[in-house]
Image (cartoon, rainbow, N blue to C red):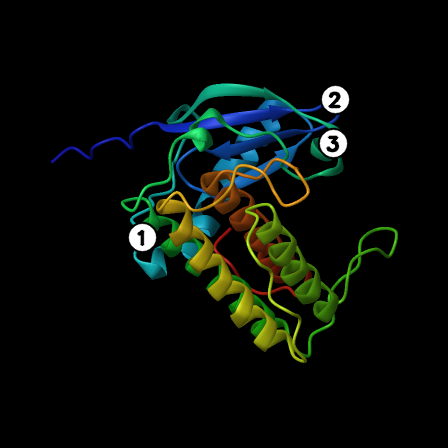
Amino acid sequence: MMTQPNPEIDIYLEIGQKKVIAGAVEWPGWCRIARSEAEALQALLDYGPRYATAVNPTGSAFQPPAHLADLRVIERLDGSATTDFGAPDAMPAADQRPFTPADLPRAEMILQACWQAFDTAVQAAAGKTLTKGPRGGGRELEAIVEHVLGGQDSYLSRLAWKRPKQPATHSEWAAQIRQAVLEALAAATRGELPEQGPRGGKTWPARYFVRRSAWHILDHAWEIEDRANIANPG
């Protein structure tokens, strides 16, 4: 019996002056950055198994592609200084689509998977010494946790959603932020999120919020795994 080939996966490229970001349109969090289009696509392919390890335990049926030919670039976006810094900044056209009740379970599943992957990495790295960069750079584990929670907290403001007050412990803060995220996304399906924040700034569409959040959480989960020398399938 012949094996059916993987269907092509739609990819967008965010192209800065120094760096290029490749992201999967329908798979938030599967996103890699490199110095050229070819290198970014190769990095995305290489991280397919790691992404599958992260998202599949919560019910996803993601199948990592085996070949670069399985990645189909459908959109190229202009990057910015943020892109060259190493973070996504441009919004794929697909993220402008309405966010409906039918979209909510999958978005929740992906975010829950990313949160779980991050928590697992933090727990596995506890007590380990994280390797430093060539110039001695890199946050310590507690600082990474606080950075990721702070990012999630600030992203809530991009939905014009009330941010929880920071409690005494990181675990309490994480629980409150994650509950607020789920409530905000549910409100988005009902059309209850404004298009502008209280100070007039433009808010993020819910789909882009999920994409940006999933990238940030997984990127740091993988950083922790790598710097703590935690075994992974990547």
Q: Residues within 10 Å of mark 1 (few under 14, many from 20)?
A: few
Spot occupied by residue 92 in the image (x, y as percentages of width and height): 50, 28
Instruction: List the residue tagged with mark 2.
Output: 17
Query: Which secondary structure lies at badge 2?
Result: loop
> On the rendered structure, is 111 left or right of 147?
left
Q: Earlier in the sequence, mark 1 or mark 3?
A: 3
Label 2 to label 3, Cα distance in Å?
7 Å
Label 3 sits on residue: 84
- Tell me the CA gap for discs 1 and 3: 33 Å
What amino acid is found at the position of numbered circle 1 in the picture? Pro
Residue 170 at what x, y percent from top left?
64, 74
93 relative to 139, above or below: above
| Residue at 69%, 74% in the rendered image | 128
* Residue 156: x %, y % from top left: 58, 53
Q: Is residue 52 visible?
A: no
Which residue is pictured at 36% across the width and 46% down the height?
189
Q: Residue at 26% across / 30% down in the picture?
A: 5
Labels 2 and 3 touching (C-beta < 8 A): yes
Q: Amino acid at mark 2?
A: Gln
Q: Which residue is mark 1?
A: 105
N-terminal label among 2 and 1: 2
Type of amino acid at the residue the image marks with label 3: Asp
